[in-house]
Image (cartoon, rainbow, N blue to C red):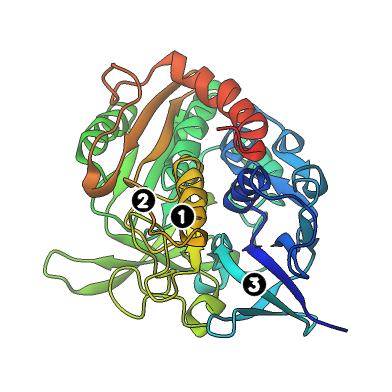
């Protein structure tokens, strides 16, 4: 059986892959072209999730079901859906090896494979999510359990963990904390609860103006931030979290904290095959992530390959809002290359993080490369507002499903 070949092959049916596929479909027909279909998309999952909703699910504001759509309803008509996983990419022969040992060829490749949640890098954690006080909103199988554990919390020490960046939606680990703290108040257990934000970072957020505003909020609400605390392990039976702490002199020490509730977020990385296929940066801050030009999103070595979304090794924040800006640029630049021209559109690093600070209030952090503030609205972005709550809760999901997923926004 002859190997399939596509004019454009997309790896990943997440936000980036579907957004790009929908836009490309506007430019290609689904008929064969020189013996090859126009577009193929490799994606093993049957369900696509709008993950920004999971914070609200964990706080009891939304349902997990509302975040889900069948993958079959999102892949554009006429685009071939290859329902398996990638083993490796050979960028020189323009081919992709799949888990069933079949090979797919391409003229152009768009990598939108997202990232990997490395739960196993927290020693002692695997097998304990959802038990022994350990919860997370970063796993669809755990979000409902997280809501139950927060709602049923009777007091004690509640630790919310932030791993080293880059991770997807770097604001989420503290967003769920703010909502949980309010739930503790509502359930009259806050006075006997110690809330800790244990972060591997040096501040509450990577952008100073928002870090200062969030620091003020945790001070006012009696939340204790522990900076330069990187979670490395848990002892679930003893309900202990183990951290690697960076001291003022740069030395590392281990510190064990007892907890009654532990919201855990794992370190994250690109899939291993990105590096083993020769597509990743081999050194520097972006080591392991896909080596693309931070403006054009074109691969630095292979001009017929582009990256979009969380897999890319660019110094931005990994969010859906970033992909919304990246997708049209990737499609435009790919079409330029296909026409024998150079990419002519640049991505400015834009990302957005709607920081939910309480029920009904959101701080809208929008920024680009080098921490440049890029607010959409002429308002102080560091002030939580009710209008932004409705933007996050009601409008952005609509924009996602009806706009981004259909190549319209």
**Left or right of residue 258, residue 281 in this image:** left
Q: What crowding class fits label 2: few (fewer than 14 Cα within 10 Å), some (14-19), or many (20 or more)?
A: few
Q: What crowding class fits label 1: few (fewer than 14 Cα within 10 Å), some (14-19), or many (20 or more)?
A: some
Do the residues under discs 1 and 2 have CB atoms within 8 angstroms? yes
The circle drawn on residue 404 is none
The circle drawn on residue 106 is 3
Do the residues under discs 1 and 3 have CB atoms within 8 angstroms? no
The circle drawn on residue 336 is 1
| On screen, residue 208 above or below 330 | above
**Left or right of residue 280, residue 408 in this image:** right
Which residue is at the front of the view, 202 or 292?
Answer: 292
- Quarter of the image that includes the N terminus: bottom right
The circle drawn on residue 344 is 2
| On screen, residue 74 above or below 189 | below
**Picture residue at 46% right of the left edge, 37% below the top:** 175
> In whole angstroms, how far apart are the C-alphas of marks 3 and 2?
23 Å
């Amino acid at each position: 059986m002859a190997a399939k070949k596509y004019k454009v092959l997309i790896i990943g049916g997440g936000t980036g892959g579907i957004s790009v596929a929908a836009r490309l479909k506007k430019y290609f027909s689904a008929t064969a072209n020189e013996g090859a279909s126009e577009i193929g998309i490799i994606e093993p999952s049957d369900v696509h999730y709008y993950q920004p909703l999971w914070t609200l699910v964990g706080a009891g504001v939304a349902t997990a079901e509302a975040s889900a759509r069948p993958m079959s309803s999102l892949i554009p008509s006429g685009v071939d859906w290859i329902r398996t996983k990638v083993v490796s990419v050979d960028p020189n022969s323009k081919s992709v090896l799949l888990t069933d040992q079949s090979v797919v060829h391409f003229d152009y490749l768009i990598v939108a494979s997202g990232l990997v949640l490395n739960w196993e890098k927290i020693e002692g954690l695997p097998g304990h999510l959802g038990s022994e006080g350990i919860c997370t909103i970063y796993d669809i199988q755990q979000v409902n359990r997280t809501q139950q554990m927060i709602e049923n919390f009777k007091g004690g020490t509640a630790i919310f963990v932030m791993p080293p960046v880059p991770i997807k939606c770097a604001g989420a680990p503290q967003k769920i904390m703010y909502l949980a703290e309010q739930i503790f108040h509502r359930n009259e257990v806050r006075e006997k609860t110690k809330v800790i934000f244990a972060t591997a970072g040096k501040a509450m957020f990577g952008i100073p103006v928002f870090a200062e505003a969030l620091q003020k909020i945790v001070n006012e609400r009696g939340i204790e931030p522990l900076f330069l605390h990187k979670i490395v392990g848990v002892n679930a039976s003893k309900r202990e979290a183990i951290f690697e702490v960076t001291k003022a002199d740069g030395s590392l020490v281990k510190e064990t904290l007892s907890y009654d509730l532990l919201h855990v977020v794992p370190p994250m990385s690109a899939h291993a095959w990105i590096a083993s296929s020769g597509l990743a940066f081999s050194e520097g801050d972006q080591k392991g992530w896909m080596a693309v030009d931070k403006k054009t999103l074109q691969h630095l070595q292979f001009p017929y390959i582009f990256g979009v979304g969380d897999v890319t090794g660019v110094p931005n924040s990994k969010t859906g809002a970033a992909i919304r800006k990246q997708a049209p640029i990737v499609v435009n630049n790919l079409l330029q290359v296909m026409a024998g021209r150079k990419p002519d559109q640049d991505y400015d690093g834009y990302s957005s993080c709607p920081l939910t600070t309480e029920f009904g209030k959101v701080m809208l952090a929008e920024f680009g490369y080098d921490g440049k503030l890029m607010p959409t609205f002429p308002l102080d972005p560091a002030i939580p507002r009710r209008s932004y709550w409705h933007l996050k809760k009601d409008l952005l999901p609509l924009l996602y499903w009806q706009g981004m997923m259909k190549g319209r926004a």
